[in-house]
Image (cartoon, rainbow, N blue to C red):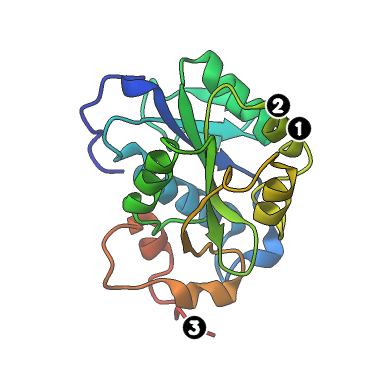
């Protein structure tokens, strides 16, 4: 874990929260412990959001009891225990967030600039999404509190829903309320390791765990 950035919690009312989900054994590269792989991805993704300027990092736990996931965060990091995106956004709003981004836990090399673009998009729309390659979302940002149509839609959609962006746009009362920022990839299968760029800075925990393992199959 790198040094914690100097930040006043809650600055500008912006939060970025990583979703901590249980490991899926079938999605782990051969020869690597599923729990260790999950935590490496989670910690690297958390480090991305923790490095954002004027943004408070947070963690969303589902299931709620995950001491190993909490251990990758810096002391004082807000911890939210919610099973839906609607609940997570509401809990972050209760913590003082005027806007927030929810981030998938398997994007260890996500460029911080892409999250910055989502927050900037909220100046013109109530929400903004980063679409994942092969379906679903890498991140979803929203102004808080959520409008009723978005809160209702997110009770039926999560970041793994293949057509999540299309469904959210279909729920919006008019076009343009869910703009799309630049897309990125997630590491959901062993084949996705080929998407990692060894020359790209970051993802140190994932890189160390994969040392000696090929990034392609």
The CA distance from mark 3 to mark 2 is 44 Å
The label on residue 152 is 1
Going from N to C along the chain, the mark reached first, 1 or 3, is: 1
Q: Are marks 3 and 2 in contact (CB under 8 Å)?
A: no
Disc 2 packing (10 Å; few <14; some 14–19; many ≥20): few
Q: Given the current orientation, which residue lies at the most extreme bottom position?
A: 217
Residue 73 percent location from the top left of the image? 41, 33
Circle 3 residue:
216
Q: Secondary structure at mark 3?
A: loop
> In the picture, residue 157 is in which quadrant?
top right
Residue depicted at 31% across the width and 43% down the height: 1
216 to 177, vertically: above or below: below
Circle 2 residue:
148
Residue 7 percent location from the top left of the image? 25, 25
Q: Secondary structure at mark 2?
A: helix
144 to 103, vertically: above or below: above
Query: Relative to residue 157, is residue 187 drawn left or right?
Result: left
Residue 109 percent location from the top left of the image? 39, 59
The CA distance from mark 1 to mark 3 is 40 Å
Q: Given the current orientation, which residue lies at the most extreme front position?
A: 174
Going from N to C along the chain, the mark reached first, 3 or 2, is: 2
């Amino acid at each position: 874990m790198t040094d914690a950035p100097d930040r006043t919690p809650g600055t500008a009312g912006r939060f970025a929260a990583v979703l901590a989900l249980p490991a899926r054994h079938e999605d782990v590269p051969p020869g690597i412990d599923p729990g260790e792989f999950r935590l490496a991805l989670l910690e690297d993704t958390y480090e991305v959001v923790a490095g954002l300027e004027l943004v408070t990092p947070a963690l969303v736990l589902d299931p709620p009891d995950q001491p190993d996931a909490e251990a990758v965060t810096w002391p004082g990091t807000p911890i939210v225990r919610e099973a839906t995106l609607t609940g997570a956004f509401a809990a972050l709003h209760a913590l003082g967030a005027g806007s927030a981004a929810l981030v998938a836990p398997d994007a260890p090399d996500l460029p911080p600039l892409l999250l910055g673009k989502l927050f900037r998009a909220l100046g013109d729309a109530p929400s903004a999404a980063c679409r994942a390659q092969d379906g679903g979302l890498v991140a979803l940002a929203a102004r808080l509190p959520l409008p009723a149509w978005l809160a209702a839609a997110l009770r039926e959609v999560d970041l793994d829903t293949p057509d999540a962006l299309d469904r959210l746009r279909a729920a919006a009362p008019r076009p343009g309320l869910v703009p799309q920022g630049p897309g990125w990839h997630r590491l959901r299968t062993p084949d996705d390791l080929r998407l990692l760029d060894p020359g790209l800075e970051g993802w140190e925990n994932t890189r160390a765990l994969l040392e000696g393992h090929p990034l392609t199959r």
